[in-house]
């Protein structure tokens, strides 16, 4: 049985996969997760890459009304895969894989922060793509 910290790590990994799908962070997260789950075996990594691509396709196909449910379901699928991986490893190997997984999660988190734009304007008037005055505008590209 896994300790709470590893369960939380697996949950964060599942969430990172879902959040990265369709963003600029996807390729890095995709390859990192495949490497973690593939244990350095090329055939296993390729299989994981294909699973990740199917996940992205499912997320892309989700309609606005079902996206939250689909995201939650896909995050749970990946959380479960990561939990199973961590559970089957010996303690020393488990700590190494957990560190690798944490690095992928941090990479995804950092990439998500890079895609955020924050502009403050007060009393704004937008005219022919020019900003005049000021106000508040928040854009997040996730």
Image (tube, rainbow, N blue to C red):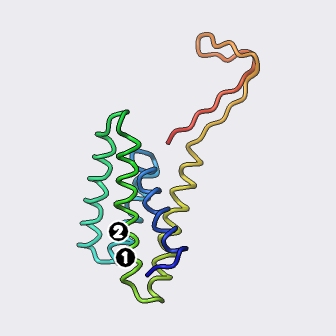
Quarter-of-image position of residue 123: top right
Residue 60, percent from left and from top: 32, 41
Seen at 48% across and 89% down, the residue is 92
User: Circle 2: is it few (<14), some (14-19), or many (20+) Cα within 10 Å?
Assistant: some
Q: Which residue is mark 1?
A: 85
Q: Which residue is more in the foreground, 123 or 85?
A: 85
Please provide percent x and percent y for residue 112.
54, 49
Q: Name the element at disc 1.
A: helix
Say above or below: 38 vs 90: above
Quadrant where the N terminus sits is bottom left
User: Is residue 58 depicted above or below 135 in this figure?
Assistant: below
Q: Residue at x 71, y 16 (%)?
A: 124
The circle drawn on residue 4 is none
Count of numbered circles on the image = 2
Image point (70%, 26%), residue name:
136
Residue placed furthest toward the top = 127
Does residue 84 sit above or below 137 in this rendering? below
Residue pictured at 55% horizontal, 43% vertical: 115
Where is residue 89, by image quadrant?
bottom left
Label 2 SS = helix
Q: Nearer the viewer, residue 71 or 38?
A: 71
Compared across the picture, whether 50 is left or right of 5 comes to: left
Rendered location of residue 46, percent (x, y): 26, 66
Q: Residues within 10 Å of mark 1 (few under 14, many from 20)?
A: some
Q: Nearer the viewer, residue 108 or 9?
A: 9
Residue that badge 2 annotates: 81
Q: Nearer the viewer, residue 84 or 57?
A: 84
CB within 8 Å, label 1 to label 2: yes
* Alpha carbon distance from label 1 to label 2: 6 Å
């Amino acid at each position: 049985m896994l300790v709470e910290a590893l369960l939380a790590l697996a949950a964060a990994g599942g969430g990172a996969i879902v959040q990265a799908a369709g963003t600029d962070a996807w390729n890095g997260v995709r390859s990192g997760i495949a490497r973690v789950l593939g244990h350095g075996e090329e055939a296993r990594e390729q299989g994981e890459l294909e699973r990740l691509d199917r996940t992205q396709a499912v997320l892309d196909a989700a309609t606005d009304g079902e996206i939250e449910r689909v995201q939650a379901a896909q995050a749970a699928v990946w959380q479960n895969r990561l939990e199973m991986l961590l559970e089957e490893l010996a303690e020393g190997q488990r700590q190494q894989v957990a560190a690798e997984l944490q690095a992928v999660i941090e990479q995804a988190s950092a990439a998500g922060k890079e895609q955020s734009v924050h502009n403050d304007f007060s009393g704004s008037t937008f005219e022919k793509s020019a900003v005049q005055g000021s106000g508040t505008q928040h854009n997040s590209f996730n």
